[in-house]
Image (spheres, rainbow, N blue to C red):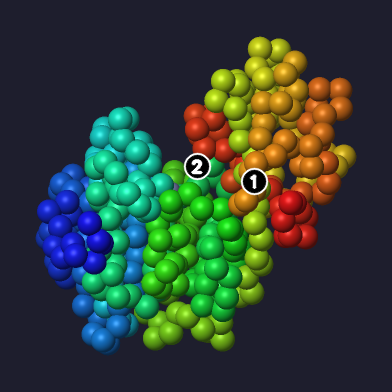
Amino acid sequence: MDIVTVTHSNLLDYLNDPSPRTLGQSPLEWLNRLNKPTVVHVTGRDRSRTRAMATLLHGNEPSGLFAIHRWLLEQHTPEVNMLFLIGGVYPAKVPPAFSLRQLPEGRDLNRCFKEPFEGEEGAIAQAMLAELHKANPECLLDVHNTSGTGPAFAVTITNDAAHQALTSLYTDRLIMTDLRLGALMEYSEQEVPTVTIECGGGQDDNAHQLAYDGLVRYTSRPDVLSLEEADWEVAVLRNPIRVELSPDATIEYRLEPSGHADMTFPPDIEHRNFGIVSPHEPLGWVGEKGLGILTAISHNRAEGVEQVLKVRDGRIYPAQAIKTFMITTNPVIAKSDCLFYAVKATGEPIF
Ligand SMILES: [Zn+2]
């Protein structure tokens, strides 16, 4: 089925200019009232244009939903029409609320924005794309939280003035990647400038505040696509590699290795986020299997990690000065997603 032929989906619920009464007093109350992935339309001053925002594609990343709830309660009139797509309502509602990235038997919704749109999540992704196509927005933001507590950053597959301007509504760091995972930004980019915003940790009040402040800027400015309007310069990090841990390897977060894990990171490893690590600074420890448990994946190939990391006396060091980010201290994320991303200290790709 062509996405263009889907007009009004029963996979989604719709709210038009919702009144505070329908929203509940707290985001949790609102979530309890949502039964499906939900599309929210808000009429703007200029009704000829629309901006879009997706959020909660991961059910445990609530900052975007918190921001939209607060903004809707305050009954702002946006500069242009707003289209909000609230994706992962099903996993978010599983008690305790906002704890599951995806349903236990389900797929990661933000890996489903590609043909053939299989399964429930694929159908939801397809219906969301149909809404975007119908609304024909001038731009799209997809608001997430990082798994750790690191600082905010943006991700895009295109680096031009419009994408940098959208980034600057939230943060001064933009990661440009040619890696394709089936994320919303990849598919929608064909039609409209799209930026993924990672607001910082899902438990972090600063991340919630940033999501709100960014939303106010996004909705209140006549022009969000020109760099002249940007509040600050954006640093671009190109084509980071993902360092992945093999599925059968074990990882622990301790001040000293216990001797039982294939890899050990110190519990404060998250402080390395966006910092430069020199070849003399140890990142952690490996067990007897050495670095063989790791793979470095660039946008076009997978390699061993020799160009990225080296081992001396059981300790892991960068093979060259690198900038690391999206480091997690959650062993589940470390194994199911990735350990961290890295570029050269200059922001250029490692390979
Ligand atoms: Zn996410």
Confirm or deny contact between disc 1 and disc 2 (CB under 8 A).
Answer: no
Position above or below: 59 against 287:
below
Q: Is residue 149 left or right of residue 74?
A: right
Residue 245 rendering spot, x and y as whole percentages: 61, 30
Q: CA distance from mark 1 to mark 2?
A: 25 Å
Which residue occupies 78% across, 55% down? 345
Q: Is residue 45 visible?
A: no
Q: Which mark is residue 105?
A: none
Percent position (x, y) of residue 136? 30, 75
Helix, strand or loop for disc 2: loop
* Residue type highlighted by circle 2: Ser
Q: How many residues crowd around disc 2 within 10 Å: few (fewer than 14), some, or many (20 or more)?
A: many
Residue visible at 74% across and 51% down? 351
Q: Nearer the viewer, residue 22 or 260?
A: 260
Badge 1 amino acid = Arg
Q: Residue at x 56, y 33 (%)?
A: 334
Q: Which residue is more in the foreground, 221 or 158?
A: 158
The mark closer to the camera, 1 or 2, is: 1
Specify few, some or many for label 1: CA neighbours under 10 Å numbering under 14, 14-19, or 20 or more.
Answer: few
Q: Which residue is mark 2?
A: 147
Q: How many marks?
A: 2
Q: Quadrant of residue 211?
A: bottom left
Residue picked out by circle 1? 301
In the image, what residue occupies the spot 25% across and 50% down? Answer: 124
In the displayed structure image, the side of residue 271 where residue 36 appears, left or right: left
Q: Look at the picture and state if 43 lies above or below 36.
A: below
The spot of residue 329 in percent (x, y) is 57, 34
Task: Say which label, 1 or 2, has the lower sequence index.
Answer: 2
Residue with the most extreme front position: 1
129 or 103: nearer the viewer = 129
Vertical placement of residue 124 versus 302, above or below: below
